[in-house]
Amino acid sequence: MASQQKRGMFIVFEGLDRSGKSTQVELLRQELIRESGSDTSTVTMKFPDRTTPIGQIIDSYLQQQTSLDDQAIHLLFSANRWEDASDIMSHLESGVTVIVDRYAFSGVAFSLQKGFSYEWCQSPDRGLPAPDLILFLDINPEVAGSRGGYGDERYEQKKVQKSVLEAFSCVKNEVIKEGYKWVDIDASQGVNQVKDAVLKAVREAASQVNGPVRQLWA
Ligand code: FDM
Ligand code: MG
């Protein structure tokens, strides 16, 4: 019997700055590689991807070296995901698990808190590869801010982080209604407890991965 290779799972981490996303992305990558016994079973990506030409414009905006209209930066963040969309698809189709640090849900949340509508915020991301699981690392901005403090980048202020947290809560409600799998993880716990909660959510969602990769908001 010909064995058909299972497609890879697409996992998105979301959360405020200092919620521990990059640590947890790396821990999950190591665990999935260990379980599969193959270094090439899992790849990680991060948005914004500051290495591309569009990513460099975004980087300069975040470092407050340039200013851009809110609409323009929103579209650039989305374009930055589209630059990597075909890579994500080819990994998934060849059976590789893809873990990303931020995705379209950050895109929507950060612009939602500037006053744009949900529909306007999500429209440029329609049709991107849709994740099988969104893990939201839930943390109070006060606790996050006390973890070594925020830096000097745009949005790295408690006031902004608070309104982004509220925006994420709207995004969560919409995304769940739309049928995507969103799991809140208490990110105020210790690193290993968060890691265990992440693994539990990933194992549960992995058993439900079937069929082709969906198109986000399409
Ligand atoms: N950010 C990130 C957005 O405003 N829109 C987006 O689409 C994405 C992916 O960029 F403040 C914001 C979130 C954060 C900043 O992200 C840089 P990192 O994860 O801190 O590098
Ligand atoms: Mg940051």
Image (cartoon, rainbow, N blue to C red):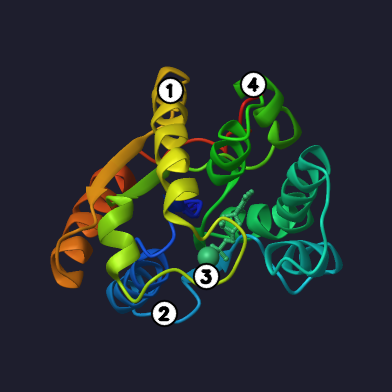
Residue position marked by numbered label 3 in the rendering: 43
Residue position marked by numbered label 4 in the rendering: 117
| Horizontal arrangement in the rendering, residue 211 relative to residue 21 (left or right) | right
Q: Amino acid at mark 3?
A: Val
Ranked by sequence position, the earlier of labels 2 and 4 is: 2
Residue position marked by numbered label 1 in the rendering: 179
Give whichever of 167, 208 is nearer the camera. Answer: 167
Residue position marked by numbered label 2 in the rendering: 38
Tell me where residue 32 appears, x and y as whole percent.
34, 70
- In the picture, the disc for residue 57 is none
Ranked by sequence position, the earlier of labels 2 and 3 is: 2
Q: Which residue is drawn at the image coordinates 48% and 20% (left, top)? A: 178
Q: Amino acid at mark 1?
A: Gly
| Horizontal arrangement in the rendering, residue 96 relative to residue 59 (left or right) | left
Q: Nearer the viewer, mark 1 or mark 4?
A: 4
At label 4, counting other C-alpha atoms closer than 10 Å, the crowd grade (few under 14, some 14-19, many 20 or more) is few
